[in-house]
Amino acid sequence: MPQPASKRSVVRLTDPGALRALSHRTRMELVGLLRVEGPFTATRAAELTGESVASCSYHLRMLAKYGLVEEAEGGRGREKPWRATARYTSWADTFATDDEATVAAADVLNTAVAERYFERFSYAVETRRQLPAEWREAEWFGDDLVYLTAAELTDLTEKMTALFEPYADRVGDPSRRPAGAELVSVLRIAFRDRRYVPGVRDAQDAQDAKEE
C-alpha cells in the first residue's frame, strides 16, 4: 500500500486527460478536501460536497485513474476510504509543449483554478462579519504593483514558498496545530500585468468589443 502524502509531495500532471479531469469543479473540490479532511469515504464526500454518494464515488475513481487520489486501508465498496496522493498539484507551463491538446487542457485548468480562487475569496468576504473580531482584524487582502525581472520574480516566489514551510505539516497532522489554529487560505498570485502596458489594453478592449 502506498504511503500517505508527505507535507511537500507534489503530483505533476502532463496528460491532457488528467488536466481535464481536475478541471471539473467537484473533482477539484474533492482533491482539496482530501488534503485537509481525508482520508474519507464516498459517503463522507457526499456530506461535505452536497453531491450524491454515487456521484462522489464516480469522481473519486476518475481522480484515482490519473493518480490524484488512491484507496486507503479499510472498508469496501462505497465505504472504502480514499486519500490524496500528494499535498500539492503542478502542471506544465502551456508554452513548454507543442502539443495542442495539452496546451488547451492546461488553459482550461488554469481558468478553473482562478475561478475557484475567486469563489472561495468571495465567500470569505461575504461571511466575514460572522468571525470574531480578532480574526477580522488578522485577515488582510491587497495588492502591489512592482517592477521585477523574471529572475527576481522567481526568487520572490521561492522566498514566499519558504515562509509557509514551517506550517505545512499542520494540514495533515492535527497534533501539530496550536490551540486556536484555524484553516486559513493564502492565495499567492503573481503575474506580469500586461493590462497596464500601453497598447495592450486598447487592443484587448477592441477585441472584446468585436466579439460582443
Image: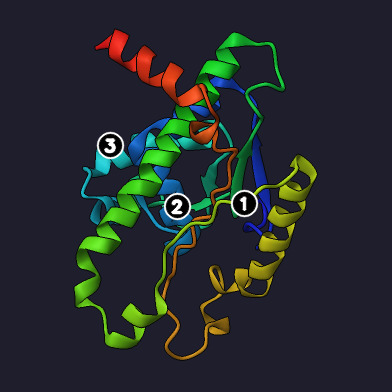
Camera-nearest label, 3 or 1: 1
- For numbered disc 3, what is the local secondary structure? helix
- For numbered disc 2, what is the local secondary structure? helix
Which amino acid type corresponds to the residue marked 2 in the rendered image?
Gly
Residue drawn at (52%, 48%) of the image:
71
Location of residue 70 by image quarter:
top right
Which amino acid type corresponds to the residue marked 1 in the rendered image?
Val
Camera-nearest label, 1 or 2: 1
Which one is earlier in the sequence, the residue at label 3 or at label 2? 2
Q: Nearer the viewer, residue 85 or 120?
A: 120
Q: Locate residue 147, reporting x and y percent.
A: 66, 47
Q: Is residue 188 visible?
A: yes
**Residue neighbourhood size for the residue with mark 3, other residues' Cα within 10 Å, grouped as few (<14), some (14–19), many (≥20):** few
Q: Which residue is mark 1?
A: 146
Q: Is residue 208 left or right of residue 52?
A: right
Which one is earlier in the sequence, the residue at label 3 or at label 1? 3
Q: Which residue is mark 2?
A: 32
CA separation, marks 3 and 1? 45 Å
* Disc 3 + disc 1, Cβ < 8 Å: no
Residue drawn at (33%, 53%) of the image:
120
Q: Nearer the viewer, residue 38 or 191?
A: 191
Q: Locate residue 19, reporting x and y percent.
A: 53, 28
Location of residue 67 by image quarter:
top right
Q: Is residue 67 above or below residue 154?
A: above
- For numbered disc 1, what is the local secondary structure? loop
